[in-house]
Image (tube, grey):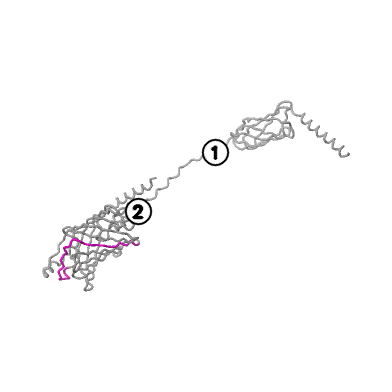
């Protein structure tokens, strides 16, 4: 009973307090301002509420601002508070909190205030990135291609083209047999100085594929100039017929096949009027023999050889013989040691005996030349870049 008597007066007092606060509301529209935060532009935001309608304990407040940066604000209206943020050109929203009030609507609008100077925005200049440099075209392996296009004197079935091993090919070269080093009698150093200025014109018409070899046809010919020192004297004593310089002409067909760094070639020369074997007796110094050594009159010459590419060098060997000669068939073997010594060796066997020779080989002209190969490379590079 005592507790009930104490609770009733408390409830009555609370109800009277609430009624007194409601009666204290202003008779007209009520206005409040929302100032800007320190250091920010002042938008001068205001809002009004209908008089006597009352406000709920929390209602949304919306407006528009011209602030140029995020803005925090707060104010009070009969104990109410509004807080929120604003960004230039965006809607301003907040919450109005009252201790106790009936439902009502609060609307607001932004009142432009004084704008403070704003620091200029940094400017950025877009610079186009430099286009990546085109990769340099691969170098043309001029020497490598032409080394593969021939054995030593005789041709292979490959053409020296960047686009592939078929097509036309030409080479003019000088073979200079400088002298004899050894023969069947032992050390026998004797000068020879026999020259062969040759030309090789070829058309490689078939490339190798699988087990099929490459094939080419062409012309091999040139001028053969024999050694003349002492020939008149010895030929007079031995009644030998003097060997004269000759221009020889041969057509040929050759087959080649590659096995990794090793390529093998075989073919035949057919002499037209005067054939390549006329050079064989010129490879002996007549001052060192009294045996007759006439030039063969055969028109067929068989040849074959191998080319081994190792560490950027080509090591070659070629063999020539006359298949129509049955007795004392001559053989000549030319070697190329990759240019290590500056000169190379040849082996000759004929009716007189055998001997080891030294010789130089000098290329005078080659086709395709450097410019032609570079054009082929550029065309192939441009074709690969096309979509």
Q: Locate the C terminus by quadrant.
A: top left
Magenta stretch in the rendered image: 286-310
Q: Residue 54 is drawn in which quadrant?
A: top right
Return the residue at label 1.
121
Q: Nearer the viewer, mark 1 or mark 2?
A: 2
Return the residue at label 2.
139
Residue 97, x across and y down, in percent: 71, 35
Q: Locate the N terminus by quadrant.
A: top right
Tag 1 secondary structure? loop
Q: Residue furthest bottom?
A: 185
Residue 199, x across and y down, in percent: 22, 56
Q: Nearer the viewer, residue 186 or 301?
A: 301
Q: Nearer the viewer, residue 238 or 190?
A: 238
> Crowding near pointer 2: few (<14 within 10 Å), some, many (20+)?
few
* 166 in magenta: no
* 293 in magenta: yes
Separation of residues labelled 1 and 2 (CA atoms)? 53 Å
Residue 385, x across and y down, in percent: 38, 47
Above or below 253: residue 241: below
Residue 344, x across and y down, in percent: 27, 65
Residue at 15 percent across and 70 percent down: it is 291
In the rendered view, does 40 fall on the left or right side of 352? right
> Crowding near pointer 1: few (<14 within 10 Å), some, many (20+)?
few
Q: Residue furthest right?
A: 1
Tag 2 secondary structure? loop
- Are the residues tagged 1 and 2 within 8 Å (C-beta)? no
Residue at 57 percent across and 36 percent down: it is 118
Q: Earlier in the sequence, mark 1 or mark 2?
A: 1
In the rendered view, does 108 fall on the left or right side of 160? right
């Amino acid at each position: 009973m005592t507790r009930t008597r104490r609770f009733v007066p408390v409830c009555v007092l609370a109800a009277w307090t609430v009624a007194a606060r409601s009666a204290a509301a202003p008779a007209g529209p009520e206005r409040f301002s929302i100032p800007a935060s320190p250091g920010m532009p002042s938008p001068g935001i205001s809002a009004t509420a209908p008089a006597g309608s009352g406000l709920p304990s929390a209602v949304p407040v919306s407006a528009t601002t011209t602030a140029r940066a995020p803005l925090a604000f707060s104010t009070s209206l009969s104990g109410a508070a509004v807080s929120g943020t604003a960004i230039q050109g965006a809607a301003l929203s907040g919450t109005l909190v009252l201790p106790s009030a009936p439902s009502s609507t609060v609307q607001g609008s932004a009142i432009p205030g004084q704008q403070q100077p704003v620091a200029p925005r940094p400017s950025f200049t877009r610079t186009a990135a430099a286009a990546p440099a085109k990769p340099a075209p691969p170098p043309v392996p001029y020497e490598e291609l032409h080394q593969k296009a021939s054995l030593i004197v005789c041709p292979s079935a490959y053409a020296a083209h960047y686009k592939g091993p078929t097509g036309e090919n030409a080479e003019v070269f000088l073979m200079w047999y400088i002298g004899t080093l050894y023969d069947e009698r032992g050390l026998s150093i004797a000068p020879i100085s026999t020259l062969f200025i040759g030309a090789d014109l070829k058309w490689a018409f078939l490339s190798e594929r699988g087990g099929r070899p490459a094939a080419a046809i062409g012309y091999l010919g040139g001028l053969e100039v024999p050694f003349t020192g002492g020939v008149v004297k010895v030929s007079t004593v031995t009644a030998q017929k003097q060997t004269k310089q000759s221009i020889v002409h041969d057509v040929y067909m050759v087959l080649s096949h590659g096995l990794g760094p090793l390529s093998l070639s075989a073919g035949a020369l057919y002499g037209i009027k005067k054939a390549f074997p006329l050079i064989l007796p010129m490879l002996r110094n007549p001052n060192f023999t009294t045996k007759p050594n006439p030039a063969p009159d055969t028109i067929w010459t068989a040849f074959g050889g191998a080319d081994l590419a190792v560490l950027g060098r080509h090591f070659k060997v070629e063999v020539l013989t006359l298949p129509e000669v049955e007795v004392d068939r001559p053989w000549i073997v030319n070697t190329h040691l990759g240019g290590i010594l500056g000169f190379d060796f040849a082996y000759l066997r004929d009716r007189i005996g055998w001997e080891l020779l030294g010789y130089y080989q000098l290329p005078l002209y080659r086709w395709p030349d450097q410019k032609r190969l570079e054009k082929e490379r550029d065309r192939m590079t441009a074709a690969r870049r096309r979509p």
